[in-house]
Each structure stands twice: as structure tokens, then as C-alpha cells.
Amino acid sequence: MSTLSNRINNLSESETLAMARLSAKLKSEGLDVINMCLGEPDFNTPDHIKQAAKNAIDQNFSYYPPVSGFPDLREAICRKFKRENNLDFSPANIIVSTGAKQSIANIVLSLVNPGDEVIIPSPYWVSYKEVIKLAETNAVYVNAGIENDFKITPQQLEQAITPKTKLFIFSSPCNPTGSVYSKEELKALADVFALHEQIFILSDEIYEHINFSGVHESIAQFENIRKRVIIVNGVSKSFAMTGWRIGYMAATVEIAEACNKLQGQITSGACGIAQKAAVAALSGDLNSVKTMLKAFHERRDLVVSLLKDIPNLKTNVPQGAFYVFPDASYYFGKIDGTTKISNAPELCDYLLKKVYVATVPGDAFGDPNCIRLSYATSNDLITKAISRLKIALDDLH
Ligand code: PMP
Ligand code: GLU
């Protein structure tokens, strides 16, 4: 009998975190590795947010916080939804968690039974697939290719729906493709969901503020499906607070209470000091967010223009988040004299070992032809990394 449960044996390690660990290890051994594998802003948390955390320590916010989050944070989240998304929620609809990652796990485990189907447009973010496995049920993938900017159509969605479909999970702006659904595109998907009342929609909006194509549009804005949309968001990406571990969700009271019950048995409330910092983030002005957005926008333009020098890496022009997801399949079957590349994991391994650039194979995100590069790093490092990629890829024949 295996020591470990089937549940854990079937679970894959997060590929993004695994590559980040490998790249940090090589770096600690003295290699000049450029990390383009982890989706993490390279900015420090803004000062007014750090100050709020320092105040919280001095004010002795050292006791167990409420499982669902401090009332002032849940109120700040409701005000944010009203101000930025024109959505009405009350604190009873909001659960604060240890990162958006936990919010997603709470929702899937609270809604899905074994045998239910969960539709995921592919490419998708790594952890959706694994948390669905933990819920002992099936993901149904709807493939969106680069020719459609990695976005699914309403027809594809309709075809994937069965009486067993319980949940749909997507992110816009999308990790890993940077694609952003327009209001019209979201409306067309909402009209399909309106015909299938059993389906809940998990809308992962963690990259809301990293959008180069205009204002953020949430699928929750459409009245005909609003009660079935569960929004996940958090402070990690928008406020450069990945390590503070604060995410949140907004849903009906019934679903929020279910997530509260689950969280109360597993982790309890998220770190109280970090929650107080999140109040400052969500209530303060967005100047630092705008500064970071400008930097990400410039970096997006830089990456896209540098990649033109490597025409065999085919890419879309990402409209948000901080990733590019080029199709690298041209290089599969090629050899640099000694190393033969058969697939994306081998290509990423080759790039790491040969020119010390860490990327993530597209397999982790549902598209084995692609590799993901995070450009949440300086212009200098981006320029250096892409020129190294060019050297390594030019050696493959
Ligand atoms: N959703 C997406 C699409 C992400 O890229 C991430 C990255 N960490 C998360 C959720 C989780 O964010 P966190 O747990 O840091 O709030
Ligand atoms: N979401 C980021 C990424 O996709 C951080 C790593 C993770 O949480 O998996 O790289």
C-alpha cells in the first residue's frame, strides 16, 4: 500500500513554482540565471501599505482574525467593487483568504461533486487543473488557439456544456496568454451561460489592474448571470504584494458561507497584519498601481518588439498581465549538435542550461506547443534574456 493518498499521488507540483525553485537554486550556485518563469511583480510593496502593516503590529493585531476577514477589509473590498466595477456586494458576500489561490480552492471544493464537469478554456492557469483533481472530478478543456488570440468563442462554449457542467473557470486578463476578453466577447459568453442555469462562473480577475487595452470588464456586469458569477481577486499582482498572501472572493451568501466553513477547518482567517495592509491597498489612491502599469506596458512593448527578431517564436500581442506565451513548436525535432529538442519541457530545460534563461513549458498551461515568459522584470534583463534566447534558438537546426 502506498504511504501517500491517491489524492496526493495524482496531484502535480505547481510547474511555475518548480521552475522558480530550480532557477533560484542555479542562481544560488553562482550562475547568472534570468528568471522569466515566475509571475511576480519585481516592485516593492508601496510605502503606505507597508506603514499600515507596521501600525497593525504596534496596535497588536496579533490575535486570530475572523475566518472570513476583518470587517473593515470586507467593507473596503465592497467599496472597491462599487467604485471600480459598479458591482453591489455586502460584507456577507466577501471571504478573504490566504491568496487568491486559496479562494479558488475554496470555491471549487465547495461547489463541485465527483462526476461534475468543470469547463476551462485552454490555455489556463496551472492551479485550476490541479484543484479540480483535488475535488475528484473532471476538467473539460476548450482549446483556444493563437489564431483567435487564445480566446474561446460562444459556439465552442455551447458545445462543451453538458447536463453535468457545474462550473466554468477563466481569467481575463489571462495567465498565461495575456489575452483580455472585450465587453462584447464577455456578453456573448454570458448569453450562453444564461441558457444553462446550473453553471457557476469563476471569474479570476487577479490581473484586473494590469490591462493595456482599456478599462477592466468583469463578466459579473451582466444581469442575466450575475448571481452565478463568483469573482476572485487579490492584492498580489496589482499592489506588488505576492508575499503578503491576501486574496478574496465575492459570491452569494450561500457560497460565501460554504467557503467560510471550509476555510475555518483548514487555515482560519488570513494573516491579520497582511489584512490590515490590504485595507490600505484597497482604500488608498492608485498612483503606485498606475506607475507599475506603465512599466508593464513598456515592457510588453519591449518584449513584443524584441521577439520580432526571433520570427520562429510565434506570439500574440498580450493585452494584459505580464506574460508572453509564444508558440515554439518550430524548434521541436531540432538539434544543436548535441541536444535534441522534442517538446516544450526539453526546450525550457535547454534554454535554462544553455543560456540561463528560466521559462515555463506550455504543457503546464494546457498548450504543449508554447512556452511562457514572464516579463515582470527590468528592461535590461528582458533585453538580455531575449538576446540569449535568440542565440540558443539560432543554434538549433
Ligand atoms: N490566479 C491567477 C491567474 C494567477 O496568475 C495567480 C498567481 N499567483 C493566482 C490566481 C494566485 O494569486 P495569489 O494566490 O498570489 O493571490
Ligand atoms: N501565479 C504566478 C505564476 O503563474 C505565481 C506562481 C504560482 O502561484 O503558481 O507564475
Image (tube, helix red, strand yellow):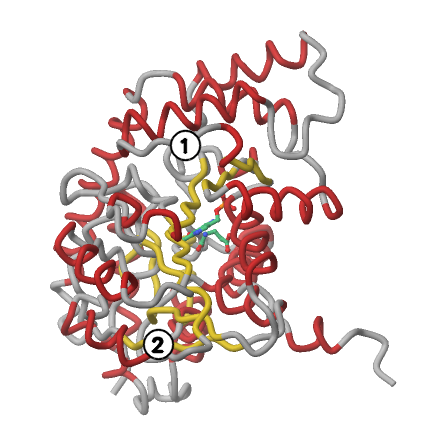
* Left or right of 361 in this view: 268: right
Residue that carries the numbered disc 2 in the rendered image: 161
Q: Nearer the viewer, residue 304 or 7?
A: 7
Q: Secondary structure at mark 2?
A: loop
**Residue drawn at the location 43% of the way across and 80% of the way down:** 346
Residue 294, disc: none
| Position in image of residue 47 (x %, y %) | 44, 16
Which of 250 and 35 lies nearest the eye of the viewer?
250
Q: Position of residue 324 (x, y in %)?
A: 27, 59
Amino acid, disc 1? Phe
Which residue occupies 54% across, 35% down? 246
- The residue sitting at 39% across, 79% down in the picture is 162
Quarter of the picture holding the N terminus: bottom right
Relative height, residue 235 to residue 147 (above, below): above
Q: Position of residue 4 (x, y in %)?
A: 80, 74
Q: Residues within 10 Å of mark 2 (few under 14, many from 20)?
A: many
Q: Position of residue 23 (x, y in %)?
A: 52, 58
* Mark pair 2, 1: CA separation: 29 Å
User: To which residue does mark 1 refer?
Assistant: 89
